[in-house]
Image: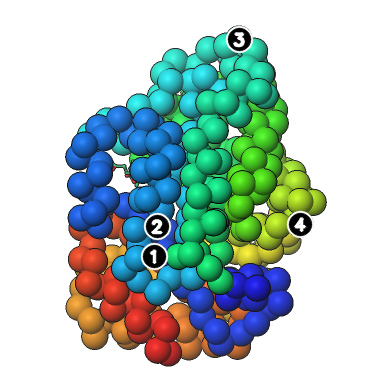
Amino acid sequence: MSPIQEVIINKKTSINPIWIMRQAGRYLPEFREIRANNPDFIKLCLNHKLSSEITLQPLKRYNLDAAIIFSDILMVPYGINQKVEFKKNFGPLLGDLNLDKILSIQEDSFIERLKPVYKALETISNNDLTLNKSTIGFVGAPWTLMVYMINKQSPKIKLKSNFFNDQLLIKKILFILEKFLKIHIKNQVDSGAQIIQIFDSWAGLLEDKDLPYYIYNPTFNLVKFIQSLGIPVICFPRNIKDYKKYCDYIKPDAICIDYEIDPLIIRKDIKIPVQGGLDPKVLLTDKENIKKEAKRYLDIFKDHPYIFNLGHGVLPETDPNMMEYLVKTVKDY
Ligand code: CP3
């Protein structure tokens, strides 16, 4: 069993495996080189040769314990026929939501559209670089995907006031997302994903009273499904106010925490394995500070099953040498 699985499944403490959200990405010059020749981001995600190569890039540099497939949560809206583009200095831009078109999509054609993702996962899990490491697949949570599908771009700080107006539309989108997210998860697992992470990047936008309908219930259904496949699931409900309540409702196998939450509260309240927390901005400072901040998390979770990670994705302006220093600090702890 790989170190991350030892932590999640066997609740091992003090082995401190590490992987980093967005570990394959823009802070790496070798990624930027490929990206410069591939201006269409979706096409790049669907080029299985390049996407598997990009996935393995950070593993060639650093002693990481996982490979996370180079893909995007918005590949699912793409797979169900909503247009998705990534505009430079703007982020994702989605096309108009045509519900008839989305409701008519067949399972076979969805799988066909996303086949290169599954092919890349096969390549990665068969590569020697992932030996004794975990291959991680992922999806966006239904709530976060629906935010992008209706809002058609990142909501930044808050949702438009009319977001919740069409309740029938919302119900249909949640229904269709649950169906195709399960298909996407199953195909990732069949292609070699040993762990699934669910990213709920916009969980923090909702008021408490809306959590059961938009987050707890739909995410719980996915978690149950992943567990029924015999695979552990890590949930990352970024900026959620009450991580304990979230874990009590959803029962993931591990919880990934953001950098706003006090890790001491997490240690006190949460019984399941914990991942992440360190502010990605720490990597923009100096080695002394990186060591100090990394050790703070390692000290706090030293008797708790803990996977080292950041509290959000690594920033594009990060110096790859600082990443190397962080990985080494965690490994030497
Ligand atoms: O972690 C990894 O290394 C795996 C790859 C991965 C990407 N996106 C590649 C990517 C993962 C796990 C994601 C998840 C994702 N995508 C999330 C959840 C995590 C989070 O960041 O909150 C979200 C919300 C998205 C949607 C998305 N994709 C946005 C908002 C953007 C633009 C802004 C940004 O952060 O770059 C993307 C583009 C994207 N996805 C890039 C990468 C490497 C950058 C593409 C580029 O311009 O080169």
Q: How many marks?
A: 4
Classify mark 2 as within 8 Å of ligand 1 or not, answering yes or no: no
* Residue under pointer 1: 59
Q: Quadrant of residue 234?
A: bottom right
Mark 3 touches mark 4? (CB < 8 Å) = no
In the rendered image, residue 298, in percent from the top left (x then y), is placed at: 47, 84
Q: CA distance from mark 2 to mark 3?
A: 39 Å
Per the image, the residue denoted by label 4 is: 230
The answer to which of 82 and 70 lies nearer the viewer is 70
Q: Secondary structure at mark 3?
A: helix
Q: Nearer the viewer, residue 80 or 272?
A: 80
Of labels 2 and 3, earlier in sequence is 2
Q: Three-letter amino acid code at disc 2? A: Leu
**Type of the residue with mark 3:** Asp
- Give the position of the N terminus as an image quadrant: bottom right
Q: Quadrant of residue 3?
A: bottom right
Which residue lies at the image location 42% right of the left edge and 48% below the top edge? 52
Point out the tag, 3 or 4, that comes first from the N-terminus.
3
Q: Measured along the vertical axis of the image, is residue 307 above or below residue 22?
A: below
Q: CA distance from mark 4 to mark 2?
A: 25 Å
Separation of residues labelled 1 and 3 (CA atoms): 42 Å
Question: Tags 2 and 3 in contact by the CB under 8 Å rule?
Answer: no
Question: Is 214 on the left-hand or right-hand side of 239?
Answer: right
Q: Determine which residue is flagged by label 3.
A: 100
**Pointers 2 and 1 in contact (CB under 8 A)?**
yes
Observer-nearest residue: 241 or 11?
11
